[in-house]
Each structure stands twice: as structure tokens, then as C-alpha cells.
Image (spheres, grey):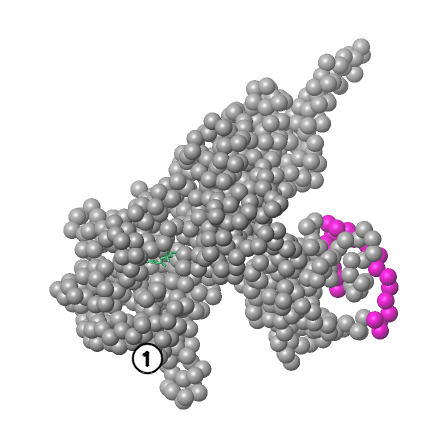
């Protein structure tokens, strides 16, 4: 058994709602991490399951007219069936109604009682039914679920949470990686810590005495109150041992699943051993709204029970529709099944009519996995749209990765009858690929793919494990590099030349020999180009495997490398060395990997989601429009109406040259008049060398330049704007005032990486409205690379806010 274990979990899903892609998002992320840890050789254990107790479930079952357990059985099975359809590699599936869980939760409760960490008392308060928690406020307060609370008086068992304020702060702030609870992203960590510290500012104002934690930061002692952990107002829960009119608070019940599933509380020695092996969990991946439960209550229960606390909690953001979190209660959900069915049948089955349903499902799951992880910076919220999914699929997978694979492997098969990569008698092994020359032959490529591959692998390995989006973007960039390499080298031209001229003979023997030598060199060169591209594809495929397990398995087999799951298990996938693809490897049978998806697929998915919705008169790619377009048919606005608009946003992209602050000002288009007349010809607007733009803007006098008020500002708030894929809403501090600026940099910068950056702002630009929001000012950025990526102008030295650039 490997030395290192890795135990990771999804949240367990409530059974009061059928699964939607919001749930799939958390599960997909955990599956990707689990696959990566397995290929790294870790003894990985991946747990998921369902959370089945509580008043919500009791009420949903009553509404459905069936007993709660039957209700839970059905919904739990639908979650499990979906994960199976998607090829999710969970190792165990826990249900909180299972006897193994119930008895272990009662043991944990008893242990806490025995240690006097739980006591019986009475409590009257405002109870949020939706969130199953008491909240502060007068009767009728609107609870966290958006509904009025109910006044509830209960005799309750209370957990002595107040004892754990400082221990929890210290646990989270500890420098010792062995002891601390790591919370990511930083915003979630800060949120938890400020909850634990209490309102320091208010307490200071009231003149209260503060205390200081080990990190030297102040906290309000007593800010953490004891927690009610039993209920008598409903029955559907785990009875408190010895006092069965109480059921155990659903969060204590639910959180304990992470231990009960791996054997906590069992008398079976094999299960005890399992618990000792895997506990504490290495990662609880959770939605951002439940970090408090995982980072405050859960570790506090464990500290009280003297059980080791989990090593990390990582929070994912929300999938949004129409500006709000996708959820059953809002009626704005998209079902994962729609995506599996649509991509499975309309794209995969069309290309492969004989494929099995399983293959079609796994293909659809790959598309969803890739889209969600590539599109949404992990930890942030992101809008889902069918149009965006199709566009991303076609760009990155069909035209990018898939096309590169087909093109490269197709050329190998067409030109080397053995179907071997670099395996001709001339022996590619003799030719160090992509070096700056060798003894006999010197092939110098302007694009050094090997160096690029090494950089990619290095960054991939050092970057935060959960930065899925930027990792996938790097891989996409590398795919483009390989594409450019192929286009530059034109192996197909060389191949045609070799085919058409190999029969040529010269009467002169010396000339004939020279010709044959050149021909041999050209064959080796052709092999070398294709081997280089194939080598890159191997690395790309190994890196993409956790995200695209089905499709990379097909590429791996086409590369002649066999079964990718075996490769993952035997450590081959972690070998990302250049040269991992051995010369002479014989390709497997070839077939398309990512058939193109038709834009009309969006409408198909929309119709699948809204079978009763009125159809537009004209088929349109999407019936979601922004304020610049009109609906073709009247669409109800109530999202719960059966004919309500589809739940996706398909907003038109911000057109180049529209009023997007920042990127507009630095447009590098030089094909006519400068694209922005305010752009001065000074060095402020830098262009990357790749564009090699020679400034051709008209000269201006210094008087013109001084009209532009350039100021140092700090970004204090950065967030996405729902339905505007390219725009970020920023609040900047100019020292003398704070401003809102909208900037078209959302494709390149994640909001969280901007906070705190000191940048340059054109402060005297007249305000204007975009998407109904005022933008006052513009950011300065340089345009970099072929796609004109904006790189914000920042400072290398300390600089006061509001300082003028002149
Ligand atoms: N049962 C609790 C978790 C208990 S864990 C000990 C629960 N269940 S849930 O079904 O409401 O949510 C489960 C997970 O799904 C959460 O992590 C939640 O964030 C995630 N999502 C549900 N809807 C989501 C989106 N719209 N977007 C992203 N994730 C979403 O909470």
C-alpha cells in the first residue's frame, strides 16, 4: 500500500431536490482531484453521498405523500445513478439513513455528552426552516433562505461551542501545516476568521476589552455562542441516545458522515483500521455557503471529542442563472442529464452511430467537466450558458485539442506505413528532437516545443491544485503552440514532396547519392516533426486526463499507449518527461475525438429543459438576449412559470470597440486609424514585441498629454457582472475618492487576483453607463501577445494613492 493517503469528500447532497449541475460541479471537482491523486500514486479515498434527515425532507416527503425514507431512497438513488452515468469514481456512497451512520452519530453524541461538551437547556428563538437553524432577529425576520423565520421554543441540547473560539482561531491561523486547518480560497478563510473573531470594530467602539490570538490579531471574547444541537419540533432525524423525543441537529448528523463512512464508531476491527488509515480527511470540498459549518462547527465538534481535525476545506463558488444561485427553490436549475443527453446523442452518437449509451454519457460528462472547470475561476461564482458551453467546446476541444490529435496522428499513419511514431529504419532515436542541432543533422525549430512543454509541466505542478481554470488555459495555450509549430513546419508539404520525388533518378551517380542523402534526411525530418508533435500530445493528454477521462483514454489508445486507467495506476501518467513517448510506438486505430457541435444544440438543450416553453417563431441559437436584442416570442418572466425563459444566459459578447473601459484604450489594431483617438503615442501604451507595432499615431503636443489625468489607484472590490462575460465591476480607491469602473478584462483576470493591486486610472474620463451601471474612469493596460491580453500597468515601488503620472 502506498505510504501517502489522500481522503477527500464532496458535501453530502440534500435529498429534498433532484440533482442539478450545481451539485455536479462540486462532484466533478472532487472527481478531478481524486483522479489526480490516484495517478500520483496516493492511496486515494473519495467519498460522496446524501444528507437525508431534517424538517425539509420530512415536509417534502409529506407533500409527495410518501414516507420520508421512501422519499429519500428515491432521490438518493437518482444522485447515485447520475454519478454512475457520469463515470464519477467515488469509493463509497454514504447515506445518513444507513445503520452504520446512525449508530456512529449516536456514539459521537454520547461521547460529547460524557465529556460534558453537551448540556440540556431551553431556547426560544427565530428558526429558519429552510436552513434548519436559529437566527438572530425579531419574529418574522427573513432567514438566510429568504423566507420569514418561525418562532420556536425548544428544550435543546447545546454544544459548548463558546469554548472553542480561540482554539479554532489558532487552528486556522497556525503556521504548522501538520496542525492547521487550511481554508481556501482566502475570501472564505477571511470570512470564517472574522466570524470567529467577532465584530472587533464595534466592540472597540463600545470600549470592550479585546483579546489577542497567537497570530497577534484581536478578537472579541465571547463572540462565539453555544450551539443548539437537537430538535424536538420534528421527528425525521437520528434520536438522541437516551432521550428520544430529541433528534440530533441535522448538521452534526450530516458532518459526521465524513467519519462514519470510513468506520468511525464501528466495532469491526477492519473498519477501525480503515478509519485510522484515512482519518483525518485531507480535503472537504464544499460550496462557499457551507464553509462555516465545515470550518467552525465541524472542527469544534472534533476538538471537543479529541479527534484530529480535517486538513483542508476548499470552497467552490456558485453556478448562477439570472444573477442568482441555481437552486430548486428558485426554479432556475439546469439538469446535468440534459447535457449528457444532448452532447451524447447530438454530437457523439451522430459521429459514432454504433457507440454505446455509456460512451455517449461519458463523452457528455467530459464536455461538462471541461466547461465548468475551464470557464469559472474556481472559488468564484460563474454564470452558466449553453451557448458559452458550445463555444468553449468547439474552440478548445473540437478545434484545439481534437484537431491537433487528428492532424498529427493522421499524418503519421498516412506517411509511415508501419503506423509507428518515429520508427522508420532511419531511426528517429538517433535524432535528439528539437535540440539546436546534432552531429549529423541539424533541425532547428523556431518554436521549441520541448522547452514550452517543460515550462507547462513545471507550472502545472507548482500552481495551486485547485486553479483548474488557469491550468486548463495553460494547456490550451500549449496546444496552440503545437498548432503553430505544425503550421510553421508544414509536414504535409514535406510529405507530398517525399511522395512525389522519391522515384526521381539522376544520371550522375554523385548527384543521385546527394539526392538520396537529402531524401533520407527529409524523411527523418518529417519523422522528427511528427514525433515532436506526438510527444507534446502525450504530455497534454496526461495532463488533461483528470478532467477529460473518457476522451483522453481514446487519445491515449490512438497514440498506441494502451489503457489510460492502467497508465494512471502504474505511474505512467505522472511521467511528464519529454521522451515519454518511445520512438517506434505503433499507433492504435484512429477516429475523431471531438466532433464539432452545431450552434443549434443550444436550442435543443433549452427545449429539453423547458419542454412546455413557447417556441420562438424563428429558430435562434439562444432565446437569451441582452438589452440590445429582442425576444422573438413573448417569454414569461417568472422563473418558476412553466414557460419561463431558459435558465441560461446567452448574452452577446461585448463587441470589440464597444465601450469597455481599459481594453479599448489599448487596442493594438493598426490596420487603419488608431482605434481609440485618446491613445497617446507615448510609451505608456506598450505593445508586446510579438505584435511589433511601430507607433503610427499622430504626434501630440505636451499640452494634449497633460489633459489626461492619470492617477494611481488601488482596486478594493472586483466582481463579475452577471450576464456580461467580459466585464468586471471594480471599485478603486484614488486616495481622494472611491470610484466604480467597469473594465473588459474578465477573460484574463479573476476578480480575486485584482484585489489590492495598485494600478493606473484615467481619472478625468467622463462617466458613462454600461449595462445600466456607471463606469467612471478607465484602467491602463498593455496589450500582450497575439490575442491582445491586457496586462495591467502596476508599480514596482511603494506609491501613494492618487499620485499623478506625468
Ligand atoms: N446537505 C448539505 C451539505 C452537508 S455536508 C456535511 C448541503 N446540501 S446541498 O444539496 O444543498 O448542497 C450540496 C453542495 O452542492 C453544496 O456544496 C453546494 O454549494 C453545492 N451546490 C448546490 N447548488 C449549487 C450551485 N448552484 N452552484 C454551485 N454549487 C452548488 O448543503
Left or right, residue 805 beside residue 749:
right
Residue farthest to the top, as pictured:
507
736 within the magenta span = no
Q: Quadrant of residue 662?
A: bottom right
Quadrant containing the N terminus is: top left
Query: What crowding class fits label 1: few (fewer than 14 Cα within 10 Å), some (14-19), or many (20 or more)?
Result: some
Give above or below for 799 relative to 479.
Answer: below
Give whichever of 642, 268 is nearer the camera: 642
Residue at 32 percent across and 66 percent down: it is 129
Residue 626 at x, y = what percent?
62, 57
Give above or below for 37 relative to 201.
Answer: above
Left or right, residue 243 beside residue 234:
left
The span shown in magenta is: 682-704
Residue at 23 percent across and 59 percent down: it is 236
Residue on which disc 1 sits: 222
Q: Please state the quadrant of the image where ligand 1 appears.
A: bottom left
Left or right, residue 5 beside residue 377:
left
Residue at 50 percent across and 49 percent down: it is 613
Left or right, residue 379 beside residue 690:
left
Amino acid at each position: 500500500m502506498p505510504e501517502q493517503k489522500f481522503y477527500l469528500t464532496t458535501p453530502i447532497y440534500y435529498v429534498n431536490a433532484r440533482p442539478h449541475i450545481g451539485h455536479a460541479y462540486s462532484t466533478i471537482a472532487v472527481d478531478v482531484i481524486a483522479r489526480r491523486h490516484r495517478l500520483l500514486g496516493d492511496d486515494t479515498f473519495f467519498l460522496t453521498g446524501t444528507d437525508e434527515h431534517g424538517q425539509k425532507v420530512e415536509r417534502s416527503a409529506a407533500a409527495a405523500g410518501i414516507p420520508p425514507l421512501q422519499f429519500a431512497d428515491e432521490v438518493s438513488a437518482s444522485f447515485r445513478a447520475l454519478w454512475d452515468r457520469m463515470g464519477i469514481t467515488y469509493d463509497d456512497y454514504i447515506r445518513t439513513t444507513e445503520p452504520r451512520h446512525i449508530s456512529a452519530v449516536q456514539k459521537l453524541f454520547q461521547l460529547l455528552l460524557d465529556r460534558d461538551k453537551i448540556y440540556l437547556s431551553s431556547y426560544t428563538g427565530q428558526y429558519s426552516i429552510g436552513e434548519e437553524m436559529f437566527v438572530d432577529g425579531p419574529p418574522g425576520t427573513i432567514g438566510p433562505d429568504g423566507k420569514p423565520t418561525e418562532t420556536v421554543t425548544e428544550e435543546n441540547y447545546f454544544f459548548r461551542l463558546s469554548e472553542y473560539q480561540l482554539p479554532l482561531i489558532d487552528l486556522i491561523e497556525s503556521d504548522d501545516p501538520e496542525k492547521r486547518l487550511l481554508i481556501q480560497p482566502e475570501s472564505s478563510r477571511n470570512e470564517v476568521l472574522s466570524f470567529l473573531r467577532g465584530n472587533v470594530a464595534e466592540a472597540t467602539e463600545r470600549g470592550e476589552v479585546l483579546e489577542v490570538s497567537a497570530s497577534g490579531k484581536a478578537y472579541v471574547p465571547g463572540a462565539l455562542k453555544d450551539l443548539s444541537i437537537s430538535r424536538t419540533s420534528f421527528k425525521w432525524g437520528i434520536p438522541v441516545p437516551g432521550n428520544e423525543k430529541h433528534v440530533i441537529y441535522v448538521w452534526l448528523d450530516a458532518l459526521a458522515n465524513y467519519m462514519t463512512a470510513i468506520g468511525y464508531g464501528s466495532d469491526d476491527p477492519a473498519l477501525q483500521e480503515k478509519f485510522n488509515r484515512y482519518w483525518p480527511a485531507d480535503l472537504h470540498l464544499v460550496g462557499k455557503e457551507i464553509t462555516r459549518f465545515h470550518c467552525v462547527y465541524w472542527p469544534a465538534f472534533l476538538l471537543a471529542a479529541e479527534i484530529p481535525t480535517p486538513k483542508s476545506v476548499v470552497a467552490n463558488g456558485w453556478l448562477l442563472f439570472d444573477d442568482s444561485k441555481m437552486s430548486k427553490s428558485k426554479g432556475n436549475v439546469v439538469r446535468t442529464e440534459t447535457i449528457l443527453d444532448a452532447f451524447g446523442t447530438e454530437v457523439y452518437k451522430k459521429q459514432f452511430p454504433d457507440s454505446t449509451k455509456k460512451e455517449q454519457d461519458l463523452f457528455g460528462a467530459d464536455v461538462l467537466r471541461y466547461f465548468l472547470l475551464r470557464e469559472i475561476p474556481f472559488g468564484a461564482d460563474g454564470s452558466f450558458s449553453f451557448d458559452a458551453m458550445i463555444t468553449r467546446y468547439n474552440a478548445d476541444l473540437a478545434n484545439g485539442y481534437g484537431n491537433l490529435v487528428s492532424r498529427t496522428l493522421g499524418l503519421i499513419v498516412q506517411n509511415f506505413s508501419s503506423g509507428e511514431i518515429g520508427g522508420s529504419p532511419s531511426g528517429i532515436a538517433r535524432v535528439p528532437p528539437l535540440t539546436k542541432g546534432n552531429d549529423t543533422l541539424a533541425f532547428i525549430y523556431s518554436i521549441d516545443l520541448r522547452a514550452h512543454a517543460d515550462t507547462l509541466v513545471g507550472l502545472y505542478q507548482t500552481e495551486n491544485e485547485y486553479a483548474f481554470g488557469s491550468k486548463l488555459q495553460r494547456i490550451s495555450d500549449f496546444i496552440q503552440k503545437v498548432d503553430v509549430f505544425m503550421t510553421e513546419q508544414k509536414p504535409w508539404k514535406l510529405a507530398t514532396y517525399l511522395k512525389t520525388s522519391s522515384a526521381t533518378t539522376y544520371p550522375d551517380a554523385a548527384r543521385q547519392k546527394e539526392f538520396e542523402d537529402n531524401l533520407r534526411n527529409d524523411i527523418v525530418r518529417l519523422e522528427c516533426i511528427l514525433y515532436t508533435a506526438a510527444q507534446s500530445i502525450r504530455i497534454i493528454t496526461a495532463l488533461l486526463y483528470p478532467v477529460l477521462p473518457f476522451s483522453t483514454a481514446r487519445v491515449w489508445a490512438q497514440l498506441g499507449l494502451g489503457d489510460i486507467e492502467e497508465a494512471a495506476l502504474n505511474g505512467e501518467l505522472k511521467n511528464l518527461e519529454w521522451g515519454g513517448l518511445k520512438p517506434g510506438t505503433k499507433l492504435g486505430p484512429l477516429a475523431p475525438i471531438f466532433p464539432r457541435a452545431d450552434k443549434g444544440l443550444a436550442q435543443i438543450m433549452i427545449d429539453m429543459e423547458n419542454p412546455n416553453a413557447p417556441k420562438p417563431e424563428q429558430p435562434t441559437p439562444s432565446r437569451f438576449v441582452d438589452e440590445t436584442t429582442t425576444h422573438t416570442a413573448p417569454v414569461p418572466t417568472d422563473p418558476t412559470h412553466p414557460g419561463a425563459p431558459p435558465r441560461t444566459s446567452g448574452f452577446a459578447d461585448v463587441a470589440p470597440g464597444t465601450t469597455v473601459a481599459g481594453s479599448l484604450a489599448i487596442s493594438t489594431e493598426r490596420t487603419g486609424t488608431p482605434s481609440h483617438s485618446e491613445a497617446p503615442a507615448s510609451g505608456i501604451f506598450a505593445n508586446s514585441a510579438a505584435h511589433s507595432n511601430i507607433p503610427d499615431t499622430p504626434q501630440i503636443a505636451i499640452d494634449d498629454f497633460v489633459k489626461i489625468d492619470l492617477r494611481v489607484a488601488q482596486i478594493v472590490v472586483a466582481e463579475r457582472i452577471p450576464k456580461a462575460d467580459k466585464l468586471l465591476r471594480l471599485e478603486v480607491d484614488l486616495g481622494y475618492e472611491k470610484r466604480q469602473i467597469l473594465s473588459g478584462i474578465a477573460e484574463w483576470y479573476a476578480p480575486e487576483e485584482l484585489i489590492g493591486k495598485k494600478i493606473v486610472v484615467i481619472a478625468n474620463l467622463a462617466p458613462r453607463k454600461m449595462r445600466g451601471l456607471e463606469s467612471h474612469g478607465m484602467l491602463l493596460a498593455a496589450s500582450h501577445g497575439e490575442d491582445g491580453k491586457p496586462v495591467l500597468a502596476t508599480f514596482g515601488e511603494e506609491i501613494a494613492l492618487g499620485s499623478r503620472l506625468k
